[in-house]
Image (cartoon, grey):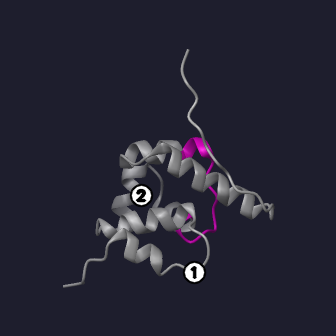
Amino acid sequence: MPIKRSASEFLSELDGPLTFGGALAALRETEEVSLAAFARRLRVSRQHLCDIEQGRKVVSAERAARFARALKQPEAVFVKLALDDTLRAAKLKYAVELHALGTR
């Protein structure tokens, strides 16, 4: 029987900055869910989820928010990670800071 790791243990083993794909992988592995089952929850293919987790695909802010809702995770965290990945892919040295806007 495999030893269950916490998300923080998984994340501490990552090299470099936290990515959107790394966060998804940490959640999936912490929940001990297969790639295929997790992909079904997100309504994407197993291969697409694998590409996201491995950093081969970048996710839009809109899709990151949808994934957050599907996984019952904070939208702001997922959106920030997705935007950070977009900036990193463009080789732009900026960091994203999000603030919720009030509704009218």
Crowd band around label 2 with a 10 angstrom C-alpha radius: few (<14), some (14–19), many (20+): some
Taking 88 as reference, is 43 left or right?
A: left
Taking 58 as reference, is 4 left or right?
A: left
Residue 32 spot, x, y in % from top left? 29, 69
Residue appearing at x 41%, y 68% in the figure? 26
Give yes or no for contact between labels 2 and 1 (Cβ–Cβ under 8 Å). Answer: no
Under mark 2, the amino acid is Ala
Does residue 41 show up magenta in the picture?
Answer: no
Q: Which mark is residue 39?
A: 2
In the depicted view, which residue is nearer to us: 67 or 96? 96
Crowd band around label 1 with a 10 angstrom C-alpha radius: few (<14), some (14–19), many (20+): few
| Label 2: element kind | helix
Report the residue marked by disc 1: 15
Which residues, given as a range, are shown in magenta?
52-64
The quadrant the N terminus occupies is: bottom left
Residue 27 spot, x, y in % from top left? 38, 63
Q: Earlier in the sequence, mark 2 or mark 1?
A: 1
| Label 1: element kind | loop
Residue appearing at x 26%, y 77% in the figure? 4
Q: In which quarter of the image is residue 6?
A: bottom left
Does residue 58 show up magenta in the picture?
Answer: yes
Q: Residue furthest left?
A: 1
Residue 47 spot, x, y in % from top left? 51, 65
